[in-house]
Every structure is written in C-alpha cells, then in structure tokens.
Image: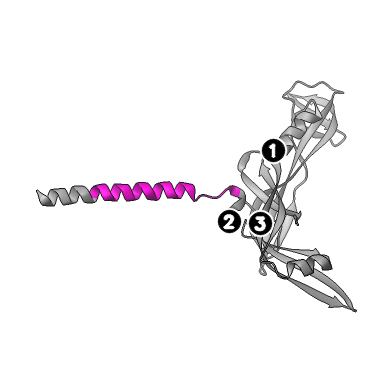
Amino acid sequence: MKQKRFWLMASVVLVVIMMIWGISSLFNKKPSVLSKPVEGSSATTSVGGMDGDVPWDYQVQQAKVGDLLDGDMVLLPNNERISNDQNFATGDQVYVLSYMQATMKTDSQGKNDVTLSQWKPIKTFKTKEEADKDLAELKVEIKTDVKLIGVYKTELDGKFRYFAVADLPTGQKVKQPIPEDRYTSFKSKKEVQVILEEVHDYSNYDQSMAKFRGWAE
C-alpha cells in the first residue's frame, strides 16, 4: 500500500514539474527582432555574416495604368505587369507598393556580400493614404539599447577617423563612422541606444530583417 502511494506521489510531482517547465518556456520567448537570426529569416546590415534571402525595402510610387492583359494590367512608365484586382481602367492613376529583396552570402572573413533584387510591384491602391498605411506596417522603426563593443580611431596624414562597433539584438555586429564628440562620449559606455528599422516580408510577416538606422543618443 505504501509503495503504491509513493509511486502515485512521484507521478504527481513529475507532472507538476513538466507544467512549470512548459509555462516558463512560453514566457522566455523573445520577439522576432530580438532573436538571433537563422538562415533565410532575420538579418542585420552589419560587419557580421549570414546567408539567405531577406526582405530589404519597400517603396510607394504613383503609376499610370497602361494595357489590360487577361486580368492583369501594365504599369507605366516601367511596363511592370501586376494583377488588376481592383478593376482599374487604362489611363487610371494608381499608387503602387513595391518590394526589394536581398540575397546575403558570407565570405571567408565573415563579411556579407549583399545582392539586391529589382523593385517588384506587389499591390496597387486607389489612394496614397491606403498605400502608406500598408507601408507603415511593413517597415517599423524601434529604439533599443545595444551592447557597445568599443570605439577606435585611425590616422592618415595627420587626419583622424573615428568608428564605433555595436552588437545588435539580432546577434550581428555593426561598424559605423562617428564624429569626434561621439567618440569621446562613447569611450566610457558599455551600452548605447540605437534606432533599428524592422522590415517585414509581405508574404510572411514573421520573417523580418532589422537594419541599423542611426544612434538614438
């Protein structure tokens, strides 16, 4: 009887431990921009390396509808073909959301070789306000604290150049030229605040790329 009671209590304790472990795992997950990138997922413009295709940029431009072809339309002046989902007519003015992708390959020194695609139209709108609303959801600016690896200066012909190297939340490192006054203020710091632009893939929002967009201090 005592042996059965012992195994029953042991089973209950094991179940409780598994439940606690599962709950803690859920709360320890990081947002996509703060997670270390994997191939074909997240990346950052930096001196660090990674391989894969990543979303690079979006833009909104005005275009004119040209020929209508089997449910598609041709956008002028670049003769780009796209689905005519909103039943536009030849001669209509539309606003076009276009997408650019980057293919990143890492060389033997750990530096990124970036190849940019051509602009690809992905959606058309009747008004610029509608297009800008979609654009604002695909490109998001955030401020965050990052680890400052260090600052250094170089000299050539009596002229100095100053640089800072930071470790971004994605796990990548970025090196940027800085003025002398920022070099002086950064020398004693371990962390600095930066501005990142998070670019999301229009077909898979969870896939994103964080790009350095400046110092926030």
Q: Which residue is mark 3?
A: 145
Is residue 18 covered in magenta?
Answer: yes
| Circle 3 Cα neighbour tier, 10 Å, few/some/many (<14 / 14–19 / ≥20) | some
Q: Which residue is mark 2?
A: 36
**In the image shown, does 216 or 206 lie closer to the viewer?**
216
Q: Which residues are magenta?
A: 11-32
Amino acid type assigned to the residue bearing label 1 in the image: Glu
Instruction: Pick whichever of labels 3 and 2 is earlier in the sequence.
Output: 2
Q: Which residue is mark 1?
A: 137
Q: Position of residue 184 (x, y in %)?
A: 78, 69
Q: Say which element carries label 3.
A: strand
At a point 76% along the width and 73% down the height, the residue shown is 152
| Circle 2 Cα neighbour tier, 10 Å, few/some/many (<14 / 14–19 / ≥20) | some
Distance between mark 1 and mark 2 Cα atoms: 22 Å
Q: Say which element carries label 1.
A: helix
To which quarter of the image does residue 189 belong? bottom right
Q: Position of residue 204 (x, y in %)?
A: 61, 40
Q: Are marks 1 and 2 in contact (CB under 8 Å)?
A: no
Instruction: Pick whichever of labels 1 and 3 is earlier in the sequence.
Output: 1
Query: Of the residues tagged 1 and 3, which is closer to the observer?
Result: 3
Is residue 200 visible to us here?
A: yes
Q: Position of residue 170 (x, y in %)?
A: 62, 56
Q: Say which element carries label 2.
A: loop
At a point 77% along the width and 34% down the height, the residue shown is 132
To which quarter of the image does residue 190 belong? bottom right
Distance between mark 1 and mark 3 Cα atoms: 22 Å
